[in-house]
Amino acid sequence: MTNEGDLAGFLRSRRERLKPEHVGLRSTGRRRTPGLRREELATVAGLSVEYLERLEQGRDTNPSVAVLAALAEGLRLSDEDKQHLVMLAMKRHSATLLPAPPPVSDEPRPTVRTLLDHLDPTPACLLGPIYNVVAWNHACEAVIRPLGVLDQDPPNFIRYHFLNPTARQVFADDDWEATADDVVGWLRSAQPDWGSDDEFRTLVDDLSAVPDFASRWAAHPIAHRQPGSKRLSHPDAGTLNFTMEVLLVGEANHWLQLWLPRDEKTASAVNALLSAPPPLRILKSG
């Protein structure tokens, strides 16, 4: 079940993104806060200011389908935002009619782990709802272990991105910012299903102390997992260029991420990492 404030926060964030001219209104007077005034949204959505205030303050958490449709139209929501709005409302009041998602730490099927091994020498990993790295193949380990991703137990790409200083060295500034936007959007999109999971809550609580995360989280971004390009500065292999392909597996609470080299230089560098001998490990006495 989602938190009572999730729907309220989402509505406020989308109102604050809009300007009067976006909805056919004239901008008048000095504005103390960004975005549309509450009375302006009430006008374009055909709702009373009092009712909209109750929704945005979390005092009314059961809007009708007609109200949701009016809000979606008034806020000029994208298709992704509309879907998220509906899921927030449904999860709050129709949870008994919806199948409960597996826990964040749900184990993948053994056959999926076998599939990962068969994908070598293409780097591939299995990710969970909060971007926890559940499993990976040999090629993936060769690429990401020198980056420090696997230093955490359990490893998590979002924790790595915001809490590990190495991430700032791996990504150029613009790429770091864009990836930060993406991963927070993925986490917000997972909130209707996994927002009450202890691991989800712990992750958000830990990261909320980081301003770069907290500001993005407060904006309620929504993003779905999709293919994309990444340029990495690897400490052992130099600049690597990948296309990230994503495939849902199992009950859709896990997905495969494949790192496909975009050029011959990257492919050769991955092969070199695979052929390099493993690092020496210090044998601890006692």
Image (spheres, rainbow, N blue to C red):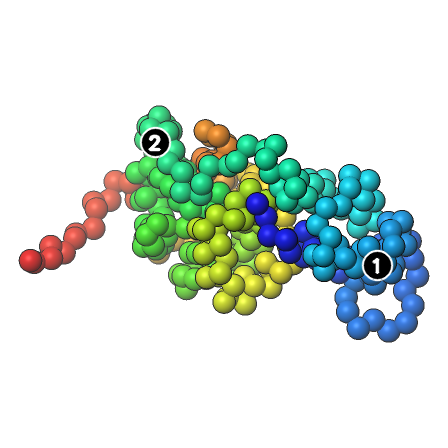
User: Which marked residue is nearer to the observer: mark 2 or mark 1?
Assistant: 1
In which quarter of the view is residue 166 placed? bottom left
Instruction: Describe the element under mark 2 as helix, strand or loop.
Output: helix
- What is the distance, in whole Å, between disc 2 and disc 1 at their CAs? 53 Å
Residue 183 drawn at (x, y percent): 53, 51
Quadrant of the frame with the C terminus? bottom left
Q: Residues within 10 Å of mark 1 (few under 14, many from 20)?
A: few
User: What's under tag 2, amino acid-wise?
Assistant: Arg
Q: Is residue 180 above or below residue 242?
A: below
Q: Residues within 10 Å of mark 2 (few under 14, many from 20)?
A: some
Q: Is residue 106 above or below residue 220?
A: above
Residue holding disc 2:
113
Residue at the spot x=34%, y=54% of the render?
A: 152
Residue at the spot x=50%, y=66% of the render?
A: 210
Residue holding disc 1:
50
Residue 83 drawn at (x, y percent): 68, 40
